[in-house]
Image (tube, grey):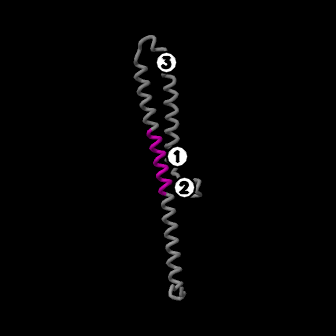
Amino acid sequence: MIENEFGIIIFRTPPMQHQRELLKRYQKRIELSLENDRQLAKKCLSSGRSYYFLKKKFQETLLINTDKQLENLEQLATDIEYAQVEMNTVDALKHGNEALKKIHAVVDINEYPF
């Protein structure tokens, strides 16, 4: 349960937070692996082996896909937070409408001449 800058309580699901953390860790592993492969590719460049360049390209693709998944997850979290704000607003409007109906039931407008 998190309170945002507007004072609205937001419920983030633990699986979503866990998934985001897993994606960040995965992204970090790929970045470290890419750096190691870059160093190895520099060494292999002199010997003419191209296998490591293909592996590097594959890992770069994995990193791009991971970034997209992380962005998608962040967008989903934002959408859920916005939906919760909308839900709280609709709930407040319902309570306000009920209060107005009670006031109208008690007060007769014809009693007060203008």
Residue type at numbered disc 1? Gln
* Residue at the image position 50 percent from the left and 39 percent from the top: 22
Q: Residues within 10 Å of mark 1 (few under 14, many from 20)?
A: some
* First of labels 1, 3 by sequence position: 1
Q: Residue furthest top?
A: 47
Q: The residue tagged with tag 2: helix, strand or loop?
A: strand
Mark 2 sits on what residue?
10
Label annotation for residue 45: none
Residue type at numbered disc 3? Leu
Mark 3 sits on what residue?
40
Relative to 10, residue 53 above or below: above
- Say which quadrant the C terminus sits in: bottom right
Q: Residues within 10 Å of mark 3 (few under 14, many from 20)?
A: some
C-alpha distance separating marks 3 and 2 = 46 Å
Label annotation for residue 17: 1
Q: Which residues are magenta?
A: 68-83
With 5 as the anchor, is 59 left or right in this view? left
C-alpha distance separating marks 1 and 3 = 35 Å
Residue type at numbered disc 2? Ile
* First of labels 3, 2 by sequence position: 2
Which SS does the magenta portion mostly show? Answer: helix
Q: Residues within 10 Å of mark 2 (few under 14, many from 20)?
A: some
* Residue at the image position 40 percent from the left and 22 percent from the top: 54
Residue 80, given in percent of the width and then of the height, sits at 48, 53
